[in-house]
Image (cartoon, rainbow, N blue to C red):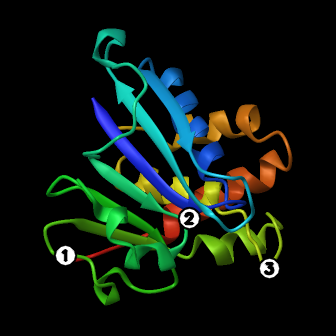
Amino acid sequence: MVEIRTHGRGGQGAVVASKILADAAFRVGKYAQSFPQFGVERRGAPVVAFTRIAESEEELPVRSNIYEPDHIVVLDPTLLSIPDTFAGLKEGGWVIVNTPELPENLDIPAKFRVATVDASEIAVKYGLGSKAQPIVNTAILGAFSRVLENVIPLSAILNSIPEEVPVKPDANQKACEEAYNMTRIRK
């Protein structure tokens, strides 16, 4: 089983990203569950979403928070300064961050693998959200697939987007593909 924890802020699409991953997993014959955790709903407040992907239904536990994720996805780089963001992340796990910074420039421990993509810029380019508040979920999933294609191939994510994001599906798919190609990996 692969467990992914997505950290974002309200309005960035963390919950929908988790749903897209689960749908994409189902499309490639895997079992999945996704669900959010957040307090009072408001734009900009921290949001955490959880996704589990398994080869069999028996592997999926009762829905519970993910305390020891295999990988984390960070939609807002300011969340990197919150210690809970990395809590329980397994050594060797991927930290996939929406930022214009190169992965080498981030203060992320060497025991984790790091990938970055400027999902905000890509989202703005395709008219996803606004310049002040881009919706980065589909773009960051392109980066996810780039580094974890063995878990979820890009084609499955692209096929899931119209189902989970019926508004601007073409633009969301293009953003996902561009992010896949623009992802940078720490050497």
Pinpoint residue 3: horizontal percent, then vertical percent.
Answer: 33, 39
Residue 47 can be seen in this image:
yes
Q: Which residue is mark 1?
A: 109
Decide if residue 83 is on the left or right side of residue 122: left
Could you tell me which residue is drawn at 32 percent across and 51 percent down?
71
Of labels 1 and 3, earlier in sequence is 1
Q: Nearer the viewer, residue 118 or 91?
A: 91
Residue 150 can be seen in this image:
no
Could you tell me which residue is drawn at 69 percent across and 53 percent down?
40
Q: Amino acid at mark 2?
A: Ala
Pinpoint residue 152: horizontal percent, then vertical percent.
Answer: 43, 38
Q: Nearer the viewer, residue 115 or 59?
A: 59
Q: Secondary structure at mark 2?
A: helix
Q: Secondary structure at mark 1?
A: loop
Pinpoint residue 179: horizontal percent, then vertical percent.
Answer: 56, 64
Q: Amino acid at mark 3?
A: Lys
User: Residue 131 bears which disc, if any?
Assistant: 3
Query: How far apart, in angstroms, are the residues tagged by discs 3 and 2?
Result: 17 Å
Q: In the picture, which quadrant includes the C terminus?
A: bottom left
Q: Amino acid at mark 1?
A: Pro
Q: Which residue is mark 2?
A: 179
Could you tell me which residue is drawn at 83 percent across and 73 percent down?
130
Residue 52's image quarter? top left
Are circles 1 and 2 on residues that touch, CB within 8 Å? no
The answer to whether 69 is drawn above or below residue 46 in the figure is above
The answer to whether 101 is drawn above or below residue 25 in the figure is below
Of labels 3 and 2, earlier in sequence is 3
